[in-house]
Amino acid sequence: ETAVFQTPNYHVTQVGNEVSFNCKQTLGHDTMYWYKQDSKKLLKIMFSYNNKQLIVNETVPRRFSPQSSDKAHLNLRIKSVEPEDSAVYLCASSFDWGDTQYFGPGTRLLVL
Amino acid sequence: GQQVQQSPASLVLQEGENAELQCNFSTSLNSMQWFYQRPGGSLVSLFYNPSGTKHSGRLTSTTVIKERRSSLHISSSQTTDSGTYLCALEHNYAQGLTFGLGTRVSVFP
């Protein structure tokens, strides 16, 4: 049963454009995450966030930023996309840091 | 180097065979999870298992912290078990999960 929702499923854009991906969880969790899965299928953490703190992976370029309106939503904005941003972006949530994480279906981004 | 190493990289099974997937890690851990990734890409949580042994149907996960390893045992494999199995650990509080590259399992009838 899906409880972490992501939109869109797929997005194609051109270099330099701004994009925004949505993530919503209905599990009542306090903590949400964004991961990037590259062409080699390696998943890497980008952001961890709850109402106490935002943790940013130091390797994430500044053009990426998370945006949260409430604890059930954590969107991802990319200010000016570059070709290397082509990947699958996966959102996840957990009750608290260190608890079981549940993942959404992912958003596939293709930058032309 | 890679903090989470999974082996084998790929595995071919005939339906009914058992399999053991390994995950070795080079750091301390705060939490450990095993996931199944469907060919379409979505991740399904199989186990949250930072220590000890857990069972779920035909799957068993065992994590031995002092040996820095975790294993996933599949018994009586079925064709529907085909996919990629990922282990992931959180080695520092609030840092998110660090994933291995996965073991790609193919089960044939």
Image (cartoon, coloured by chain):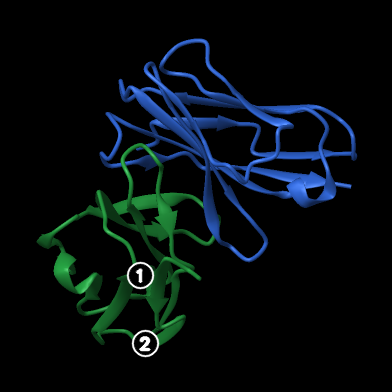
Tell me the CA gap for discs 1 and 2: 10 Å
Relative to A108, B44 lies left or right: left
The residue lying at 55 percent from left, 61 percent from top is: A42
The residue lying at 74 percent from left, 32 percent from top is: A63
Which residue is labeled 1 in the image? Answer: B81
Placement of the C terminus of chain B among the 4 image quadrants = bottom left
The residue lying at 25 percent from left, 39 percent from top is: A99
Q: Quadrant of residue A96?
A: top left
Q: Amino acid at mark 1?
A: Asp
Return the x and y of residue B62 as percentages of the image width and height. 16, 68
Q: Element under label 1?
A: helix
Q: Chain of mark 2?
A: B
Q: Element under label 2?
A: strand
Closer to the camera, A100 or B82?
A: A100
Which residue is labeled 2 in the image? Answer: B13
For disc 2, the neighbor class at 10 Å (few under 14, some 14 to 19, many from 20) is: some
From this view, report whether residue B29 is shown above or below residue A54: below
Question: Share a chain, discs 1 and 2?
Answer: yes
- What color is chain B drawn in? green
Residue B57's disc is none
Return the x and y of residue A109 as percentages of the image width and height. 73, 44
Relative to A17, A110 lies left or right: left
Return the x and y of residue B21 as percentages of the image width and height. 31, 77
The residue lying at 32 percent from left, 73 percent from top is: B24
Check if mark 1's residue and mark 2's residue have beta carbons within 8 Å.
yes
Pointer 1 or 2: first along the chain? 2
Chain that appears blue: A
